Image (spheres, rainbow, N blue to C red):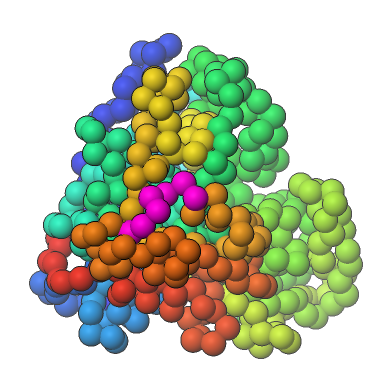
Amino acid sequence: MRRERFFVDAPMPPPNPTTMAATPTVFNRVPVMRYRVDVTPAVGVRAVVVAMPGFLGGAGSFDPLARSLVKRANTGGAPVEVWVIDRRANLLEDLRGMSAADRLGDPEVAAGFYNDQSVTIGGEVFGGYRRANDAALSFMSEWGLATTLDDLRAVISRVPQPREHVILMGHSLGATMVESYAAWDFDGVGGYRTLAGLVVVDGVASGTAASEAAWRAGSMGGPFGSTAGVEALRRTGPYFTSLPILGVGALATSEIVARRAALSPSAVVADPSRDRVLRLLFSLTTVPPLTNAAAMGLAFDDTSCPLAFARMSIGRPTGGPLRMVTNPFASAEQLTVPGGRTETYSWIDAPMSAPPEFTPLANAASAWSTTPTNFGEWYFPTRLSLDTSIVGNLRLAADSWQVREGIRATHGAEVDVPVLAVATALVGRASAFEGMRARVAPTVGVDLPAAGADRMSERGFRALFVPGMTHLDPLTGADDGVRNPVPGLVAGFVRDNTRGMVVVGP
C-alpha cells in the first residue's frame, strides 16, 4: 500500500469584514492524504472514499481505517483509494520538528525542538505556537463551513464521475460536515449529486439550529463552555479552538509520546513537558516512571483519558498501584490513574487485555505519529464550530438568515444517496440517527446501484451501534474480522454502492 500527500487548489474565502484581512494565497489549498495500491502508474479503482476528520482531527486520525479499506478492497479484486482531508488550518502548523525526528529515527529531536528549543532545524529555533487572539490570524474568521465545504468540493471534483465512485465519510463533527456537504447548494445543484453514498461514524447533525443571536453574540454551547459569537470573533478572536488548560502544546507532546511508543515501547524516558501534561490530565502531583507504551496508553485509554472525544480502548497499565480520581474536565466521571510514586508502570496491550480491547498500541502510536501530516489539528477554526451549530435540519429556506450568512444547506430533503451510520460512545445509540433518516429523500436515487431502496431498508439507510467502542476506536481499532465490525461494514458499503472503474490522479 502506498501513502502519499497531494494538494488541491481551493477558492479564496472572503476577507474578514471587520479587519479586512484576506487569507494569504499559501493557505488557499487543501492537503489530502492518499492511500492506494502501491503500483506505478496508479491502477483503476472502484471507488474513492473521501474522509473528513472531526473536531481537532487531522488526516492521521483515519490512518488505520484507511489502510484497512485499501487492503480489503485490493484483496477483493476491486481496488479502492482513500483520500483523507487535512483541512486548510493544518497548513498553519510548524511540523519541522516532527519531520526531522522521523528522518533521523529519534523522537528526542522533536522534543528538543518544541519543548526547550535545544534543537534547531535549518539554523532556526521553534518560533512557538500560534496564539488564538493573534490579529495576524484574523483572516481565519472566515474559515467556516462554507470555506470547508468549498474546499471539499474542490477535492471531490478531482474524481471523474464522482456520482458513481465517491463515498463521503465523516467522523464526529466531520459527520455533520459531510451531511452538510450532501445538502449544500453549489450553484443550484445539491452536493449529493457528486456522491454515491454517505458514511457517518459516531456523529450526526443535531437537526436543530442555534439562534441567530447566539451565532452573532456567542453562547455557552461550545465544546469547552462559552463560545465567542461571529461578531467578536471577527474583531478579536479567538480565531482557533485549543484544548482548555492544556493548550496546543499538548497535541505536539502527544505526537512525541507516540513516536517514542512506536520506536521504543519499553524504554523509560524523563520528559518534564510530558509530565506537566499528565499531571494536569490525571490530577497528579508526581508522575511515576512510565515506559513509553504506558505513557501513550494512559494518555488515551478510556479508563484514564479525561477527554471523551480522544479516548481509545487501548489496554491497561501494570507495574504499580492504581487509584481513582475525579475527571478534571467532567466532575461526574472517575478516572483510573497511577497511584504510586516510584514504581515503574508498563502497559498490557489491547489484544492481551482481559477481555481484549479494540485498539492495539501500535495502531494508536502509528496514527499519532504519521507524517507528513498528524493526528490532531492544532489550530481548529472557531468559525467552523460556530457554523456547524446553525445548519439545523439541512433543509434551510432560501430566505433564511443562515443562507443570508452563507450557510447554503438547502437540499437536505433531496439527498438521495444510501447511508451507513455507525454509533459508538459519543452518539451512544443507533436511534440517534432517526432524525437523519427522516430528513433525507425517502428513497435512493434511480441512477444509483440501490435505486429505489427506501430508508427503512438496510440498502437505503443502515444504522447500528457498536457496544464497547470508544469514540476513536472505529478509526483506530484492529481490523481483526471478529470484534471490530467497522472496516468490514464500510468496505461492504463501498462495494455495494459503487460501480465500474475509474483512474484518478493527484
Relative to residue 34, is residue 282 drawn left or right? Answer: right
Q: Residue at x 61, y 49 (%)?
A: 250
Based on the displayed image, in which of its 4 quarters is residue 196 positioned?
bottom left
Question: In terms of secondary structure, what is the magenta stretch mainly?
Answer: loop
Placement of 399 over or under 295, stated as above or below: above
> Where in the figure is residue 208, as x and y percent of width and height?
57, 36
Question: Is residue 357 depicted above or below 331 in this figure?
Answer: below
Which residue is found at the position 23% from the left and 77% from the top?
79
Q: Is residue 140 above or below residue 301?
A: above
Would you say 504 lies left or right of 122 here? Answer: left
Residue 351 vertical placement versus 141 (above, below) = below
Q: Nearer the viewer, residue 324 or 134?
A: 324
Q: Is residue 252 magenta?
A: no
Q: What is the magenta range? A: 438-444
Q: Nearer the viewer, residue 37 or 3?
A: 37
Examine the image and state in which quarter residue 298 appears: bottom right
**Residue 52 appears at what percent x and percent y?**
40, 53
* Residue located 37% across and 76% down the image: 492
